[in-house]
Image (tube, helix red, strand yellow):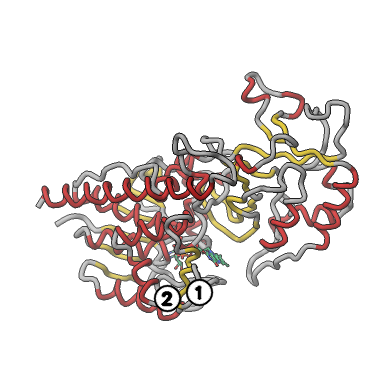
Amino acid sequence: MTQELHIVGGGMAGSEAAWQAANMGVRVVIHEMRPKVETFAHQTGNLGEMVCSNSFRSDDDEQNAVGLLHWEMMQAGGLIMRTAHAHRLPAGGALAVDREAFAEAVTAALHAHPNVRISYDEVTDLPDQGTWIFATGPLTSPDLGAAIQQETGTDRLAFFDAIAPIVYADSIDMSTAWLQSRYDKGETEEEQKAYINCPMTKDQYEAFIDALLAADKTEFHEGETAGYFDGCLPIEVMAERGRETLRHGPMKPVGLTNPHAPDVKPWAVVQLRRDNALGTLYNIVGFQTKMKYGAQTAVFKMIPGLQDAGFARLGGIHRNTFLNSPTLLDAQMRLRSKPNIRFAGQVTGVEGYVESAAMGLLAGRMAAAELTGAPLPEVPQDTAHGALIHHITGGAEAKTFQPMNVNFGLFRPVDGLKGGRRGRKDRYKAYTDRAKAAWSDWLAQQRLDGAAAE
Ligand SMILES: Cc1cc2nc3c(=O)[nH]c(=O)nc-3n(C[C@H](O)[C@H](O)[C@H](O)COP(=O)(O)OP(=O)(O)OC[C@H]3O[C@@H](n4cnc5c(N)ncnc54)[C@H](O)[C@@H]3O)c2cc1C
């Protein structure tokens, strides 16, 4: 008999991890602290509870990276996707569900599984013995958060995200913007050209500040604290403190020369910094924001050079416990300093129900393979699951690591296809076709290995 797998947290990731491992023949114990210990966002003691929206976003598996993740999870017999489809509500191209029926069905399926036991208790330390997956989510309990910090160091576990918008590099107009680090700092040409700069005239800056001040903003949820504010002010709050604040802060125009107009000194400059090793994504430096999504798109497109920008993700600030995964986790999501422990879900620095469940799916399979001694082929990087796990465990910039949702900017380019907006449809179809083939092969390989082992 193989050892038990302990999974802490029965949310999106923990439920999916348990389902996958149990179906691979491993006995699983889920430790869920609710309803004994509550969070400010969960309302029930159900597993797989959706804390806010009832949508799993786009179900388009040809043109959308989230839809592709849905497809891959369905092919892998995923509990979260299977149950979502069973409780689907009409919502156009989105996969929206009846949230109560959904969570009750996830809970019932796990209760009924002969290999799963559910223990309603809070886990407050990282055990030295046994095989564990921690999938405790953005609202990881404070005692466990403290134990994780003790193991990883205080600067490696964040309690808020402060996400600046992330833009697809190929949607930036480089006939307006230019590559340059402030004062050309750096030893190599790559370092001296590490930023993309977007210049503003005085009129453009004033109009931008007006738009920032007028934009719709979201409020913090009750129970979220605004105590983070000192470290990372939202740009609209900086603008409220004075019209010149941004020009002396993240938008200061010093140390930069616009090669398109070398004699004109910009009044302000917006800088974008590379966000992944592939160089396909750039974040707008210092632009964390609480503006509503619609307002963000309108306001950020006022920035010269970003008028046609495609956003891989918009900005936000939320209560969110997450690890600096690129430095702490290995490619199998094991804690480097304690490899009997894996992390999965939002706590690893992915963002969203679907992405969290997907990382649970991988962690469950990886842990089960380890326990049963069956080999697990490497997750192909050109799949949606592979692009995400590769990003969080290595592809992302560790220094500026912030939670990421799945998007095509995380995918390796397909050779021979046109960049820019025009070629987008063909490009996305090529990504999803390539991913589907690679994912199907990966699953087939595991079925073959499983059959050979029997
Ligand atoms: C306020 C809020 C709103 C959000 N809205 C959305 C949204 O609309 N759409 C979206 O896609 N994403 C949203 N998210 C992000 C969302 O939480 C994640 O996408 C998803 O739920 C993460 O899945 P998870 O399994 O990692 O964590 P969760 O689903 O949160 O599951 C973690 C589980 O671990 C349990 N737990 C925590 N600590 C312990 C412990 N020490 N011992 C035992 N159990 C523990 C918790 O009770 C919980 O059940 C929101 C997050 C927050 C905080």
Using the rendered view, name the quadrant where residue 379 is placed: top left
Q: CA distance from mark 1 to mark 2?
A: 9 Å
Q: Find residue 410 and report its horizontal and vertical position in percent.
A: 49, 44
**Residue corresponding to mark 2:** 88
Q: Find residue 80 and report its horizontal and vertical position in percent.
A: 37, 67
Residue 325 in view here? yes
Mark 1 in CB contact with mark 2 (< 8 angstroms): yes
- Residue 152, relative to residue 347: is it above or below? above
Q: Find residue 278 and report its horizontal and vertical position in percent.
A: 51, 36
Q: Which residue lies at the image location 47% right of the left edge and 49% below the top edge?
A: 428
Using the rendered view, name the quadrant where residue 258 is placed: top right
Check disc 1 and report its element: helix, strand or loop: loop
**Residue corresponding to mark 1:** 91
Looking at the image, residue 81 sits to the left or right of residue 218; the answer is left
Q: Which residue lies at the image location 30% right of the left edge and 71% below the top edge?
A: 110
Using the rendered view, name the quadrant where residue 36 is placed: bottom left
- Residue 387, relative to residue 23: is it above or below? above
Indicate the amino acid at tag 2. Arg
